[in-house]
Image (cartoon, rainbow, N blue to C red):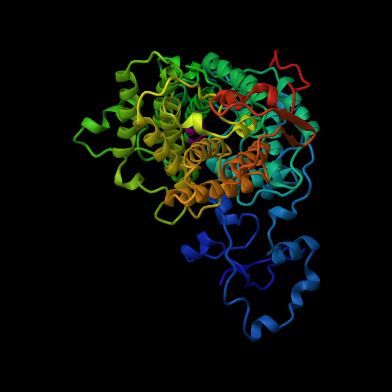
């Protein structure tokens, strides 16, 4: 049984008592758990997902009936920590825009003066590490000392949003320093504002337009050219995409890409210039995360290339997430060339799940170059399909399942499968007859404008698009807390649902067909997953409402009529069109359908 040890105001340790709950990780490893929610201290320090399953034993026995005589000596904060056993995230305080507050490790809260705020004179700051040479000079990195894990971060101010960021979002985009090192790094106000903004989406209600504008203002008012600004703009672009603001997301993403290349973040030796290995790994991960996000959004916006894919010099590949979280760097960083040569080498080299995520994005980048071209040679299309299937068949045994040895989801590997199956759908779906079979109500659906149609060429394209959509549905059926992972999964699931609805519509005349119920079950599963995502991200709420209209047209067809789909304060009137008119695809991710307009902040000078 886990125990909670409390200290009274005089600093004396009170008698320990059993905690009614222990998280799954602590139970699995037979370790004591302090049962803090939404994430216990051990999982917080190790950057692990923290899940609670109520104990079947409870607190049965004589000891559980004894009154706790030490409660008189406890402060309200102590009693709250000892009894916080209910679902914490659903009852979090409402998101409030961040304030310029400093974070301090608990053991130095009274006299701690490091990390220094931007207003602190340089003479009062701690001695900096040796300076980097241009163009890698980053004032926010120069004033740091080698990181050491913080024991128990303070919960003052906006710390609760930092905890939510790491508990709910970080595993899907792990490029900032691990949670245990966060308090020791002097992140600037612009980056902490974005972290608070992202973490705020996991409270109810999530941040509104005012909070978004204040966060954007914090970024645009910071004119420094630094890695931290790259990270802030990248994080903000992901959040804006998930809020269904594609134009704004692309604006900040382009700023992040331009700044990263200008700083030389893609240079193979950029990370090696950092003395701290955690910072060095964070820099490598920042570049590759930028590469992946730009590639994925380029595909969703029907672009044929993306800038990160045009640079020649590239940094080493990131290591495993677990090693990064525990600051284990025993293995030398491997290059992309090492990864490409692995299939022809006799040596048994192991590569991280992050590396396979990068490889999937590289294939996606090749697919979008030919996906919308109706004059692409059959050999080119076949070569892309070969690359997709080669990625799948050459996964090592340790990467065949998205679950690790502890039963936890490998988020990087799960995203890799989403990326590679999206590439397959974008390659084959436009070349199949499936787009011609969707109902007219599909004109209202977002999230797939990027699929440009070409004349159908082979029945094999429909088969392969359907197979890819089934693999995405299988991911959605896994017993994992999907809302704790990247919101980029949403558009992949929407693409899979579109393919399934197309197949259902093509079989609509044969209502008794044995496969029809199977397709229907897949559609309802995806809609259930989107429902979970919709608690936090607007893009899931909108696409879920739109897919319901489409699904109703497939499974419960009505006589032709005009319809109106309303989302929030916006209404979109969509007249029905002929079934053969497949221009509905151009409404997916159409910029005119954004819920919000351009930010009320001048981003040109960012």
Residue 133 visible at all:
yes
User: Magenta residues?
Assistant: 278-283
Measuring 53% from the left and 36% from the top, which residue is drawn there?
498
**Is 182 a magenta residue?**
no
**Is 281 a magenta residue?**
yes
- The residue lying toward the viewer, choosing from 38 and 600, is 600
Measuring 56% from the left and 72% from the top, which residue is drawn there?
1
- The residue lying toward the viewer, choosing from 73 and 510, is 510
Residue 403 visible at all:
no
Residue 257 x/y as whole percent: 55, 19
Residue 229 x/y as whole percent: 63, 24
Could you tell whether 266 is left or right of 221 in the image? left
Q: Locate the C terminus by quadrant.
A: top right
Q: Quadrant of residue 176?
A: top right
Residue 481 x/y as whole percent: 55, 52
Measuring 24% from the left and 39% from the top, which residue is drawn there?
348
Measuring 44% from the left and 26% from the top, which residue is drawn there?
272
Residue 68 x/y as whole percent: 73, 77
Q: Is residue 216 placed above or below 105 in the rendered structure? A: above
Q: What secondary structure is the stretch in magenta mostly built from?
A: helix
Mark count: 0
Q: Quadrant of residue 552?
A: top right
Could you tell whether 487 is left or right of 309 in the image? right
Residue lying furthest left: 346
Q: Is residue 414 placed above or below 561 in the rendered structure? A: below
């Amino acid at each position: 049984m886990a125990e909670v040890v409390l200290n009274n105001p005089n600093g004396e340790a009170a008698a320990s008592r059993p905690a009614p709950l222990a998280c799954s990780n602590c139970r699995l490893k037979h370790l004591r758990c302090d049962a803090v929610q939404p994430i216990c201290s051990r999982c917080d320090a190790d950057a692990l997902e923290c899940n609670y399953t109520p104990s079947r034993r409870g607190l049965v026995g004589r000891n559980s009936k004894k009154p706790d005589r030490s409660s008189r000596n406890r402060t309200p904060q102590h009693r709250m920590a000892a009894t916080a056993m209910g679902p914490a995230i659903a009852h979090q305080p409402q998101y409030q825009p961040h304030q310029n507050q400093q974070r301090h490790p608990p053991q130095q809260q009274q006299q701690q003066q490091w990390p220094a705020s931007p207003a602190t004179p340089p003479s009062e700051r701690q001695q900096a590490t040796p300076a980097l040479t241009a163009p890698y000079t980053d004032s926010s990195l120069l004033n740091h000392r080698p990181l050491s894990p913080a024991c128990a971060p303070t919960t003052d101010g906006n710390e609760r949003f930092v905890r939510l960021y790491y508990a709910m979002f970080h595993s899907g985009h792990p490029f900032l320093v691990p949670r245990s090192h966060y308090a020791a790094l002097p992140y600037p106000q612009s980056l902490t504002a974005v972290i608070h903004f992202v973490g705020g989406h996991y409270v109810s209600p999530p941040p509104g337009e005012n909070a978004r504008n204040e966060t954007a203002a914090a970024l645009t008012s910071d004119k420094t050219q630094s890695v931290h600004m790259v990270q802030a703009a990248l994080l903000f672009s992901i959040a804006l995409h998930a809020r269904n603001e594609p134009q704004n997301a692309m604006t900040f993403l382009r700023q992040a890409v331009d700044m990263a290349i200008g700083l030389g973040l893609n240079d193979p030796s950029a990370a090696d210039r950092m003395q701290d290995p955690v910072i060095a790994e964070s820099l490598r991960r920042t570049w590759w995360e930028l590469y992946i996000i730009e590639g994925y959004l380029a595909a969703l916006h029907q672009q044929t290339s993306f800038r990160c894919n045009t640079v020649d010099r590239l940094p080493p590949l990131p290591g495993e997430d677990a090693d990064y979280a525990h600051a284990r760097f025993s293995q030398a960083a491997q290059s992309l060339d090492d990864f490409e040569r692995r299939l022809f080498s006799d040596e048994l080299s192991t590569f991280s799940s992050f590396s396979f995520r990068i490889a999937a994005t590289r294939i996606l980048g090749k697919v979008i170059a030919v996906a919308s071209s109706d004059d692409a040679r059959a050999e080119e299309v076949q070569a892309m399909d070969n690359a997709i299937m080669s990625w799948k068949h050459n996964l090592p045994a340790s990467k065949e399942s998205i679950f690790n040895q502890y039963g936890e989801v490998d988020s990087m590997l799960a995203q890799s499968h989403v990326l590679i199956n999206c590439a397959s759908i974008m390659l084959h779906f436009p070349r199949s007859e499936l787009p011609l079979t969707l109902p007219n109500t599909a004109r209202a659906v977002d999230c797939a404008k990027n699929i440009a149609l070409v004349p159908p060429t082979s029945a094999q394209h429909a088969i392969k698009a359907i197979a890819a959509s089934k693999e995405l549905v299988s991911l959605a059926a896994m017993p994992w807390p999907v809302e704790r992972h990247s919101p980029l999964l949403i558009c992949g699931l929407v693409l899979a649902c579109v393919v399934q609805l197309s197949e259902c519509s093509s079989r609509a005349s044969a209502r008794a067909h044995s496969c029809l119920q199977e397709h229907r079950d897949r559609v309802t599963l995806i809609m259930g997953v989107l429902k979970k995502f919709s608690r936090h991200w607007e893009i899931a709420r909108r696409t879920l409402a739109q897919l319901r209209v489409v699904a109703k047209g497939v499974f419960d067809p009505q006589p032709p009529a005009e319809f109106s789909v309303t989302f929030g304060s916006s209404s979109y009137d969509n007249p029905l069109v002929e079934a053969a008119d497949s221009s509905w695809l151009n409404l997916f991710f159409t910029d005119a359908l954004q819920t919000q307009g351009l930010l009320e902040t001048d981003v040109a000078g960012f």
